[in-house]
Amino acid sequence: MNKSTTAPRSVPVVARTPEELTRLRAGLGRLALVPTMGALHDGHRRLIATAREHADSVMVSVFVNPLQFGPNEDYDRYPRDLDADLAACAEEGVDAVFAPGVEMMYPGEQIVTVNSGQMGQVFEGEFRPGFFEGVLTVVGKLFNLVRPDIAVFGQKDAQQLAVVRRMVRDLCMPVTIVASATVRDQDGLATSSRNAYLSAEERESALALSRALLAGADASVTGPVGILSAARAVLDEAAVAEAPVVVDYLALVDPQTFTEVPGDYRGDAVLAVAARVGRTRLIDNVPLTL
Ligand code: PAF
């Protein structure tokens, strides 16, 4: 995280219970919420900056949501360091942090959940069954608890952004969803808390994801078939690297519905990729206009 350019500021107020949150919320005016699972990096800093453009106050929620992790996923080893997150929030001038415990968010069995429908069962939803149900359920809870006017989500998680937008629309939630552009490290890798798991060799291989997206974007005048084959060529090469890139999916989709676009498509699209490098699963995407 690039800390050198940001001066330290006062530590944000932290709420851990609904009562503390209600008291805090009362003084925050028009509020933008940035939901996170902590391990804050430059991508989150961009979300916070976007949030500040849209509201009087900014709240960051920090909660590693067990409901969105599958049984063989990294819930236990997911990085957790609230002090470091609070320091990052202080540097970014965040007004308040909501950091509930698991018992607060899930006091008993979660019987009622938010179903993401078909759009949450493809791509990420196919490889991570139950993931979007977990995301939507916790985001719905956060919206009910915090009552933000605006909530900011990263374009990096394009399918998550699309299903959250759809939930807000279909369930008439009084919150405006704002998207924030993907932040990349200098080598092109999209920032993610999971990048910390990569060895140097794996990281080198992982760069194939952003290279593939760039190759696809460069081929955008050729249409969907040309875009996908340009991106696929880069990934095929990376599949035989020392630390191989194992692709889960590469697809060109409609950004609103996450359905694949036909060969003669014209309009906005998202070229999305997911792959595993060693034990780390990475996703990335680039928005395109065809
Ligand atoms: O994108 C994330 O970090 C999580 O999926 C979110 C939106 C905070 C829900 O747990």
Image (cartoon, helix red, strand yellow):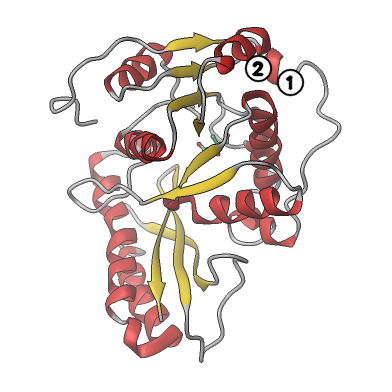
Quadrant of the drawing holding the N terminus: top left
Residue under the point 35% across and 50% down: 182
91 vs 130, left or right, is left
Callout 1 touching callout 2 (CB < 8 Å):
yes
What percent of the width, then of the height, locates residue 128?
A: 63, 48
Q: Which residue is mark 2?
A: 102
Q: Residues within 10 Å of mark 1 (few under 14, many from 20)?
A: some
Work out whether residue 265 can be spotted.
yes
In this rendered view, identify the residue nearer to me: 113 or 148: 148
Ligand 1 appears in which quadrant? top right
Up-down relation of residue 286 to residue 5 (above or below):
below
254 vs 206, left or right, is right
What percent of the width, then of the height, locates residue 211?
A: 27, 64
Q: Which residue is mark 1?
A: 106
Q: Residues within 10 Å of mark 2 (few under 14, many from 20)?
A: few
Q: Judging from the image, what secondary structure is the residue with disc 1 in?
A: loop
What percent of the width, then of the height, locates residue 35?
A: 52, 32
Q: CA distance from mark 1 to mark 2?
A: 6 Å
Residue under the point 30% across and 25% down: 92
Work out whether residue 70 can be spotted.
no
| Amino acid at pointer 2 | Val
- Whether disc 2's CB lies below 8 Å from ligand 1 is answered no
